[in-house]
């Protein structure tokens, strides 16, 4: 399995830090955000990793190189301007291959997520070994988190392990997912496209699987959040699981 890390965003709310440093290279607890992901992927045996870049992308490539320092093989997909998540995937498809891949946002901090679990969430056959018709198998699998303070209404409902657009309670998409490449057939390389509408369209067809991750998870959006995570343990304000 290959992985993709999204690292093309501007990080507007993290300014002025992101005026000179790409957000994925900001350090949390002594390590750049993106390096936490790389090391956790490699630990799970996922060593071929695609990184898309736009804003200050040359700094990311200079810092990470070919990935050999981490035991990984890094490939880069360069975007003149950030193409959003689905557009970034479509543009990088020639690097991702034809098998399902895991993708994660480079600006989230989830140090204890075990990427080994993503390898077998999408199945082509049922428990008796019979192949699923293409229109009945899951096209992707998402990891949801408890709703953080900044997003109290959540994104999606969940019935067993099937994502639904409506329903209660709702959970927040944790920006980690496993995707079949064909999900992005309708998006041309270089096209700007968001992932949300695509997920919702497949959720209506009951082709999106999901589960809830309740480990430590932070969507870093402000300088204050970064400072809080980097504060000494004795001065750090306790935060609930999943809270930004």
Image: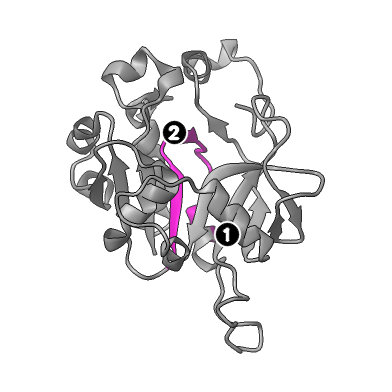
Q: Residue 7 — which label? A: none
- Say whether residue 113 is visible: no
Residue at 74%, 54% (x, y): give it.
158
Pick whichever, 227 or 83, lies toward us.
Answer: 83
Please state, as top left, top right, bottom left or bottom right, where the C terminus lies in the image.
Answer: top right
Residue 177, above or below 218: below
The picture places residue 163, in percent across and down from the top left corner, at 68, 56
The picture places residue 175, in percent across and down from the top left corner, at 53, 43
Q: Residue 141 — which label? A: 1
Q: Which element carries disc 1, helix, strand or loop?
A: strand
User: How much space separates mark 1 and mark 2, taking CA atoms?
Assistant: 20 Å
Residue 108 covered by magenta stretch: yes
Which residue in the structure is indicated by mark 2?
Answer: 107
Residues at circles 1 and 2 in contact by the CB criterion of under 8 Å? no
Crowding at mark 2 (Cα within 10 Å: few <14, some 14-19, many 20+)? many
Q: Pick whichever of labels 1 and 2 is earlier in the sequence.
A: 2
Please state, as top left, top right, bottom left or bottom right, where the N terminus lies in the image.
Answer: bottom left
Residue 4 covered by magenta stretch: no
Residue 69, above or below 159: above
The picture places residue 222, in percent across and down from the top left corner, at 49, 18
In this rendering, position of residue 73 left or right of residue 158: left
Residue 57: quadrant of the picture: top left
Crowding at mark 1 (Cα within 10 Å: few <14, some 14-19, many 20+)? many
Residue at 64%, 28% (x, y): give it.
243
In this rendering, position of residue 97 left or right of residue 40: left
Residue 194, above or below 181: above
Residue at 60%, 88% (x, y): give it.
129
In this rendering, position of residue 232 left or right of residue 74: right
Residue 31: quadrant of the picture: top left
Q: How is the image coloured?
A: one colour
Segment colored magenta: 100-117
Pick whichever, 241 or 189, lies toward us.
Answer: 189
């Amino acid at each position: 399995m290959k992985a993709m890390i999204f690292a093309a965003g501007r990080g507007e709310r993290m300014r002025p830090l992101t005026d000179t440093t790409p957000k994925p290279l900001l350090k949390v607890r002594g390590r750049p955000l993106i390096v936490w992901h790389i090391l956790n992927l490699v630990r799970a045996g996922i060593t071929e990793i695609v990184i898309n870049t736009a804003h200050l992308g040359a700094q990311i490539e200079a810092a990470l190189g070919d990935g050999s320092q981490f035991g990984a093989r890094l490939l880069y997909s360069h975007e003149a301007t950030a193409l959003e998540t689905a557009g970034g995937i479509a543009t990088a498809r020639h690097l991702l291959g034809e098998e399902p891949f895991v993708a994660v946002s480079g600006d989230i901090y989830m140090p204890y997520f075990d990427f080994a679990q993503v390898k077998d969430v999408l199945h082509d056959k049922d428990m008796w070994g019979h192949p699923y018709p293409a229109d009945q198998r899951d096209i992707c699998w998402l990891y949801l988190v408890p709703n953080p303070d900044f997003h109290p209404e959540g994104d999606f409902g969940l019935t067993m392990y099937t994502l639904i657009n409506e329903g209660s309670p709702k959970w927040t998409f944790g920006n980690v997912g496993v995707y079949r490449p064909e999900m992005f057939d309708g998006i041309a390389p270089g096209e700007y496209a968001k992932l949300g509408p695509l997920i919702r369209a497949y959720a209506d067809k009951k082709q999106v699987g999901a589960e809830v991750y309740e480990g430590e998870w932070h969507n870093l959006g402000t300088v204050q959040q970064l400072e809080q995570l980097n504060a000494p343990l004795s001065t750090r304000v306790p935060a609930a699981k999943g809270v930004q």
